[in-house]
Amino acid sequence: MLALVPAAASAGALAPASPASPAADDERAAYVVVVVIAVLLAIGLIAGLIAATRGSGDDEPERRTRGTSGVQARVGAGLGVLAVAIFVFGVIVTESAREVEPTGADGLQTVQRDLSLPADAEPLEIEVSGQQWLWRYQYPDGTFSYYEMVVPVDTAVVLKLDSTDVLHSWWIPALGGQAAVAPGSDNQTWFKATETGEFEGSSTEFSGPGYATMRARVRVVEPAEYQAWLTQQAEDIKEAQEAVAERVLAEDTPDEQLEEDAE
Amino acid sequence: MTPPIYTGAARPEVVVEDLGDERAGWVRTATSADHKAVGRMFIATALTFGAAALTLLVMMRIQLIVPDATIIRPEIFDRLLSAYGITGLLFFAIPLFMGLITYVVPLQIGARGPALPRLGSLSYWLYLMGAIFVYASFMYSPSEAGTIAVTPLSEVSSPSHGVDAWAVGVGLMCLSLIVFAVNTLTTIRLGRAPGMVWRRVPLFSFASTVISWLLLVIGPVMLAAVSMLLIDRNFDGIFYDSGEGGAPMLYQHLAWIFFTGAYLTVLLAAFGVISEIFSTFSRQPQFAQRATAGSMVAFAVLGLLAWMQNMYSEPIPIGFLYFAMLMAVAMVVPAGLIFFNWIGTLRGGSVQSKPPMRFALGAAVLIAIGLAGEWAGSVVPVGWQIGQTGVAWGDTHFALIGGGVLGGFAALYYWFPKITGRYMGTTLAGASFWATTLGAVVMIVPVQLAGLEGMPVDVYKFFGDTGMSAYNLIASLGAILFAIGVILTLVNAAASYNGGSEAGHDPWGGSTLEWFALSPPPPHNFDLVPDVRSNEAYRDIREAVVARATELELPPASTAGPEPEPAAVAAEPAAAQAEQGAEDGSSEDDADEGEAGDGPVA
């Protein structure tokens, strides 16, 4: 069993999920750079400590002179330069990850109302609503789905997040970092899936007894398939709503009939 | 008590007979305002709650031992989770250091007692009341609102008073922290021995000062946060209710300010302890006392200002996140300098592998790993991916287990002979050290690997299809090993309290003033308060004693070279106090008292 750890590690598990979106790409790059530096720092400090404990072994060794302030200043300045460099690097990567990339040539070509952005920057806007313990997605045409979001590939997707009850956090590691929402504090994030496939994630904000089951999936498909899915989904919803309405309107539906339908 | 009226000849023994029955030892300890009694109660209570936190941790890890487990119901798991965070941090790690500070700092600065002894006592009882409040709620319905009880969940969950008990318990603990900080600050500012200017204050006492200022800042913040939570929950308040115009993010900000400060408190206390131990056990002076002290201040200030580092995924304007990131990445300067100075202190020294030294070294290693991880996670895009996941959980646990458990145990092993006059067992200490350290690593690293694959924190189960089964199994086994390690030290402390081998007043050859007092110290700590002429006050005294003994040509046992033999060490406080007391001619009594002490057991 223990052999699984190095095996998994060598398989690239020592960094977040392999990215399928520019933002996740930036985040993974930042992760690799910063973690390598942090690991080197930690190893240096630990090795220094361990090496320093290999003392002379005398009962009463010669007492060292104390460190001069010059040494302190040089070490401090070195670390300060490192901190500033990491900060600048962090800001650059953050800005890059925040910037919505325009939809690619293979993406869904769509013009959205009320936006004066150039046509090639048009993002697909999806409203994402968190509730205990399920995500709801509302697409631009009013169609909606739960748990699984379907999006076209190579298309900039902007997610408008809100929550109906408590704090939740949207997170699909392969598509980008976390975005938390609570009632009254909406959030937004974006991604542009570079490949088709299914990407899983889970909420990272504790939200009550069902928290562990608050997962989400994004299914990335070709634009044509996305359009077909939207049509199908709209039809299904309409059908289901009609069925419900029919049953509700039929006031004298016997209870047995309802139970039978439910089965 | 009215003095007895006595008209006959002077017979003091009659007065003694007239006194009431002597109360039982534990009653005297519990009602005493003596800082040593309060400190002992703090330490004992903190270790008890350490066992409680450990139980909660192991129960949660057992639930997570296999995927889709149903051993513990989700609601029950959430109750364990909600108690675990504050038990480990607020009822174990911080009070353990509060107890050590209460006990050691007055001795270390050469004071006869704290400035405000009754406040010390009050802070202990507030702490105990707070902890009891939280645990009493287990009898009906404890909080299910998570580690820091974030709103709005804490306002809508637990319709019974579980969250209220949690909030009251945390609020009482905040009061305790404030009262403790006032007492400690006053003691250190007013009680230092003559000559102990700030640059000569030992690093543990200096860390206590920094901690106290930190607690004065964060205590009222959390007190306000839980008060508003209680008003919202019980009296129709709208502080956090966004639907009514309240501020939805306010509680998170306040709570994170507090918990960031609490985290820093544990680390700073551990920094102080490790600095003392490294200096003592390498027989070297602090490589750079002032730089280390300054770094502690900078570490506290920067760390506290970086509280939003925990909130990167929240909808906060990006400028604020950059500010938090700048503060957090800048922490590498003070943290790096502290480690650099530890290395400088150890280098060229004669390192003795005694239990406190081992634990201190282990603490430094785990803290280095934890801080490096936190530092990496404080870069915004990295935090977006690993915040609130197993990775962040692991970094925090590395730092807090390193600081609170290993650092706290290092301090316990170090000062136990001062507190009880006895050593803690070495064999159990060795086993405990390896089980604790390896257990922590084996528990934390797999959780971090699972976190990289998308495992969030605080979940009551994980799914079999996510490829995290092996990680969680290993982590749970590591948790059990870790628990065994902690229990071994608790058993060791309990068994050694009356059964350890006797240690004498200065078992480690320390250079700070607490080793000048007897073990355990008398109620007034010192017969004579010494003059302090450097940051190694007791070392100066020891050297002066040797010099004086050589001068007087005492028998060879007391004059063996620059480092005195055990017999000479044993006689030191007496001789030293005799030397200092020679001026007022009160040397005789002191000498008698000193001879009662024993030298270190070979």
Image (cartoon, rainbow, N blue to C red):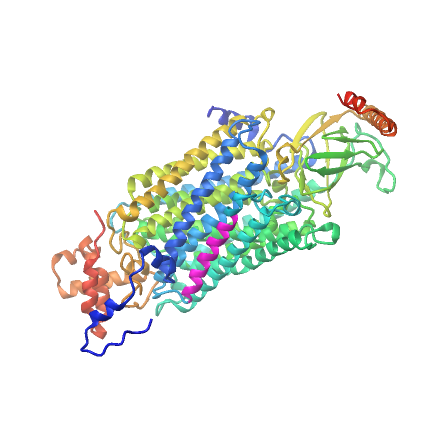
| Residue B589, quarter of the rendered image | bottom left
Q: Position of residue A148 (x, y in %)?
A: 72, 29
Please state which of residues B39 and B234 is positioned toward the viewer in this rendering. B234
B254 left or right of B44? right
- Asked whether residue B118 is drawn in magenta, I would say yes
Whether residue B508 sits left or right of residue B365 in the image: it is left
Residue A136 or residue B164, whichever sits in front? B164
In the rendered image, which quarter contains the N terminus of chain B? bottom left
Magenta-drawn stretch contains B11: no
Instruction: Label the magenta part by its dominant secondary structure.
Output: helix
Q: Is residue B442 above or below residue B225?
A: above
Q: Position of residue B33 (x, y in %)?
A: 38, 62
Q: Give the range drawn in magenta.
A: B116-134
Q: In which quarter of the image is residue B145?
A: top right
> Can residue A32 be seen by looking at this rendering?
no
Q: Where is residue A214? Give x, y as percent.
A: 66, 33
